[in-house]
Amino acid sequence: MNEYWNALAGGLLIGLSAAILMVANGRVAGISGIAGRLLQGVQATTGIVFVLGLIAGPVVYRLFAGTWPTVTVTSSWPLLVVGGLLVGFGSRMGSGCTSGHGVVGLARLSRRSIAAVVTFMIAAVVTVYLQGYFQ
Amino acid sequence: MSGSVFSRLLATLASGVIFGIGLSLSGMLDPARVRAFLDITRDWNPSLAFVLGGAVAVSALGVLMTRRMQRPLLDDAFHLPANRVIDRRLIIGSAIFGVGWGLVGLCPGPALASLSLGLPATALFVVAMLAGMVLHDRLQRVGPRLQGQGNDRIGLESGRLP
């Protein structure tokens, strides 16, 4: 049951983060967009500051929780490379990922984001389903 | 200009840190949990639905606040996506992203945040992810037609939907 409360509390914090960026700076908290622009050298300072904050998040969490958050990676190294390439390429081509389309886009009732979220959820569920037969 | 560059960077930093704490608390950093959430036909763990639910709820409050504002607190104008066309790029890109997300269980936010744990596996994923982003942006610059810009509408323009 605890994991449900933690999931909800974590979600509320993620929403707060997106709300701060929207209300204070008028910008979308989309990680793939921020990272992609950073790689292009566009809004580089903003991008670096956001990413450094993002990386500092688990460290702050550890100060309060006493332990690092659980990260269980079972994928082989080739799979990590393929998955990473697809996530990077696809999120740029589709103009967003779980944060930009999911957290912010759905909140704005953007039709593009609703279409994107439905598409990547179906693709991810089908991928995990099929993977079950090849492992 | 309302609000200095520094104040905007401070808001950006706060947003990033809170995002990272939220990811850590929620369980989204754990690819095994994410894949269990996506594994709806076998051993489904639906808890991560509460992450998206909670996040969208608070984010929507922020959006509602901005509806009453002429401009954001610290800037002169909102910088929001103007594109409203559901095109092939959006759908194919999202599908590609979804396959990668399902394969490993990491999306860009959790992948970057988990760098702080210093795990070689997530670092490798991040390098590949950034390479994928650069690859896309290079291809887009070289061949806009390859990416089908402007002439590939599926016909779902937002204004015409029921």
Image (cartoon, coloured by chain):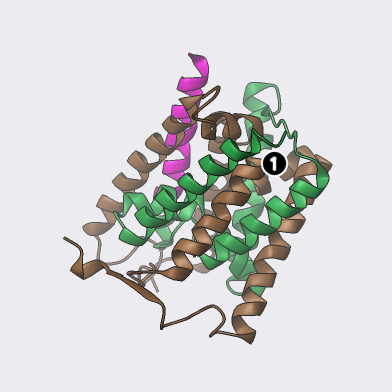
Chain colours: A green, B brown
Magenta-drawn stretch, dominant element (helix, strand or loop):
helix
B48 w.r.t. A108: above or below: above
User: What SS does tag 1 mark?
Assistant: helix
Q: Residue furthest top?
A: A1
Amino acid at circle 1 = Ser
Q: Residue at x 73, y 54 (%)?
A: A82
A104 vs A125, left or right, is: left
Q: Nearer the viewer, residue A118 or B112?
A: A118
Instruction: Write the start and end of the magenta stretch as one range.
Output: A1-20
Q: Residue at x 69, y 21 (%)?
A: A66
B99 w.r.t. A75: above or below: below
- Within 10 Å of the Cα at label 1, are there few (<14), some (14-19), or many (20+) other Cα atoms? many
> Is residue A25 a member of the stretch shown in magenta?
no
| Residue topped by disc 1 | B114
> Is residue A6 a member of the stretch shown in magenta?
yes
Quadrant containing the C terminus of chain A is: top right
Residue A63 lies in quadrant: top right
B135 vs A102, left or right, is: right
Visible residue check, residue A41 = no
Residue A7 percent coordinates (x, y): 49, 28
